[in-house]
Image (cartoon, helix red, strand yellow):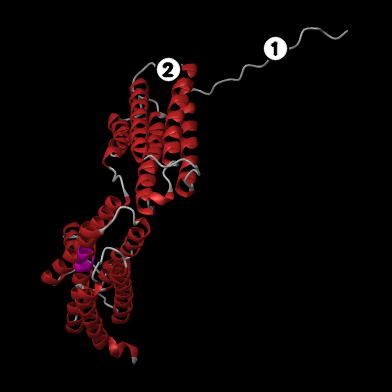
Amino acid sequence: MASATAPAAAVPTLASPLGQLRHLAEELRLLLPRVRVGEAQETTEEFNREMFWRRLNEAAVTVSREATTLTTVFSQLPLPSAQETQKFCEQVHAAIKAFIAVYYLLPKDQGITLRKLVRGATLDIVDGMAQLMEVLSITPTQSPENNELISYNSVWVACQQMPHIPRDNKAAALLMLTKNVDFVKDAHEEMERAVEECDPYSGLLNDTEENNSDNHNDEDDVLGFPSNQDLYWSEDDQELIIPCLALVRASKACLKKIRILVAENGKKDQVAQLDDIVDISDEISPSVDDLALSIYPPMCHLTVRINSAKLVSVLKKALEITKASHVTPQPEDSWIPLLINAIDHCMNRIKELTQSELEL
């Protein structure tokens, strides 16, 4: 006769506290690709900018608080029980998902540039929290305190940055343009410094000489160090560098002028045009870097010519987009034609100096 008593339901066994932290870190990392490609939540309600930023800041405060709590309880012995750890992990997971949900409320019509900045901040918070879980999952006796503090600090800093994110697409565009100006400025200064010293590899060579002062031999070439003839510029190289430097200076001037126009004439409601300006301006710094790298010896003049042409193409496109936008109210009287002439002059000189490479 079958027993009338039903078997008791099996109670699920919780993983160890440290195992739960490792599992949570994995779950948080799985959220990162979704945030990178996730679209804004569709809604018929009018976007309330003030409410959105208030909610985003509140969500960041909650994440920061959960990071503090978790760091405190797992940085000392005895560790929390499995049941207590489950509650802590659930609170962390809920806080992160709540933050992501608020990010999804930012519609595209507020500006792609602004949305990229908020997405980047969201990714920093999620990734920072995952790093914290991984560090805390190491037993306290094996986990250096500075590692825990560094991981916690990355979450805290990311959360603290939320109130400082630009609130509209014009402010976001100005921030990105300023960063691009700084990038190109740094590249230009590095190129000028190398030319003034006439020794582009001085730092590398000094380190090598100090490390091998008591062991001079012929192994450098075998190990991949540049040979002596590859360390310096020839006279032709130095002549070609002059218009290249001028072209990079023109790039810096171009970005500065575009930033000024956006600051003075940019309209917050013209989000699409501002996004177009930022998108093309974002291509200038990588193109400058490519040109800067190609001037280091041993210099290939054909590569310099190709990279210069790519940079010129990007610069002209940036100027064309800026000229056609609302930030340039009187394009016929603007500085843009003068800058285009300067860019063409640099490129023509580079072509003259590299023409022999094409004829080989």
Q: Which residues are magenta?
A: 252-257
Is residue 317 within the magenta segment? no
| Between discs 1 and 2, the one toward the N terminus | 1
Q: Residue furthest left?
A: 196
Percent across and percent down for residue 170 are: 29, 53
Snapshot quadrant of residue 291: bottom left
Q: Residue furthest right?
A: 1
The majority secondary structure of the magenta stretch comes to: helix
How far is mark 1 from mark 2, CA to CA?
A: 28 Å
- Amino acid found under the numbered disc labelled 1: Ala
- Amino acid found under the numbered disc labelled 2: Pro
Instruction: Pick the quarter of the image with the N terminus.
Output: top right
Tell me the tag on residue 8.
Answer: 1
Instruction: Pick the quarter of the image with the C terminus.
Output: bottom left
Tell me the tag on residue 80.
Answer: 2
Percent across and percent down for residue 137 are: 42, 29
